[in-house]
Amino acid sequence: MSMAIGLALALGGVAAAPAATAQDTPMERAITAPGRKGDLAGTLREPAGDGDAPVVLILPGSGPTDRDGNNPMGLKAATYRYLADDLAARGIASVRIDKRGMFGSSAAGSPEDVTIGAYAADTRSWIDAIREETGAGCVWLLGHSEGGLIALASAAQNGEGVCGLILVAAPGRPLQDIIREQLRANPANAFLLKDADRIIDALVAGENVPDSEIPAPLLPLFRESIQGFVRSEFALDPAELAKATDLPLLLIYGGRDIQVAPTDGERLAAARPDATLATFPDMSHVLKSVAGDGMQANLATYADPDLPLTNGVGKAIAAF
């Protein structure tokens, strides 16, 4: 999604979860859910125990991000694998997934033939499959970044079988506002801003913009083949979606997130005063603590698969 590529244009320390012993090593196995054209693929991680653990469905962020939280554009943080490990050590099961048309879910349709509504339908399929596989009465939706918007849209579409929502570094404003802000954060993008605003305004109005009218650096964000998806994002206000559901809501944000600001969490919390808001001052967008100041220190958290999650994130989710 645009948020990840927007970072490229606009351009944590911690204790890991308690170590598992030989007796309580979490179990991991493949799980599938029916997709539009083929099966969606994921990994179910269960803690040791009697099989009655709560289950969290991890909805990934933007772009070609896989079930572990990595992508071929340089993201190697393995954030979702760390989350699964941490939650399992705390007695909570999780399912992390590959999105439609990507990686293990490549048979489920084209990765560009999607909208937020289509991802919400896939989420519904995952909820049903997880409940059938595990016997859980309901499933917690954990949406990271763009996945938070999908979690909100899914709950609005059909909240049956959803225990509650956990939004992590999720947008609290319409996406077009965040993209404009990301682009303006880097002075080197100044020559692109007029065209970016023109394209965004057209997409918000429901119009198509030919590739021939899009500067090359902006094509990854706005090319014609993904404009249907981008328009579906721009049509949604996360705060309005949050206000429309009464499901339990946990909001987690990082003080050093260079993609989604903590103020987005505050906007969601204002829409849902009963929500729980947790902010980790040193945490980046990929849920890892930033060692040092400046952009390079922040970006280093995106590329280090050995850096654990910021201390307290898993505990806050488990407590909720």
Image (cartoon, rainbow, N blue to C red):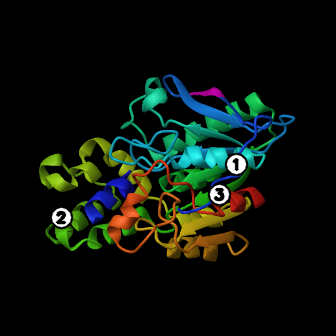
- Disc 2 versus disc 1: nearer the observer: 1
Check disc 2 and report the residue beneath it. 195
Magenta span main SS: strand
Instruction: Name above or below for residue 273 compared with residue 65.
Output: below
Q: Residue at x 85, y 38 (%)?
A: 52
- Crowd tier of the residue under label 3, counting other residues whose Cα lies within 10 Å: few below 14, some 14–19, many 20 or above: many
Q: Are marks 2 and 1 in contact (CB under 8 Å)?
A: no
Who comes first in sequence, dot 2 or dot 1?
A: 1
Position of the C terminus, as image quadrant, is bottom right
Image height of 145 relative to 96, above or below: below
Q: Nearer the viewer, residue 179 or 256?
A: 256
Residue at numbered disc 1: 87
Q: Earlier in the sequence, mark 2 or mark 3?
A: 3
Type of amino acid at the residue the image marks with label 1: Leu
Nearer to us of marks 3 and 1 is: 1
Choose between 291 and 114: the one closer to the eye: 291
Is 150 on the left-hand or right-hand side of 21? Answer: left
Tell me the crowding category of disc 1: few under 14, some 14 to 19, or many 20 or more residues within 10 angstroms, Cα based. Answer: many
Q: Residue 308: image x %, image y %?
A: 55, 54
Residue 159 in sight: no
Q: What SS does tag 3 mark? A: strand
> Are the residues flagged by discs 3 and 1 in contact, CB closer than 8 Å?
no
Stretch of the chain drawn in magenta: 29-34
Check if residue 63 falls in the magenta segment: no
Mark 2, residues whose alpha carbon is within 10 Å: few (<14), some, or many (≥20)? some
Q: Which residue is mark 3?
A: 166
- Picture coordinates of residue 161 (x, y %)? 75, 43
Q: Secondary structure at mark 2?
A: helix
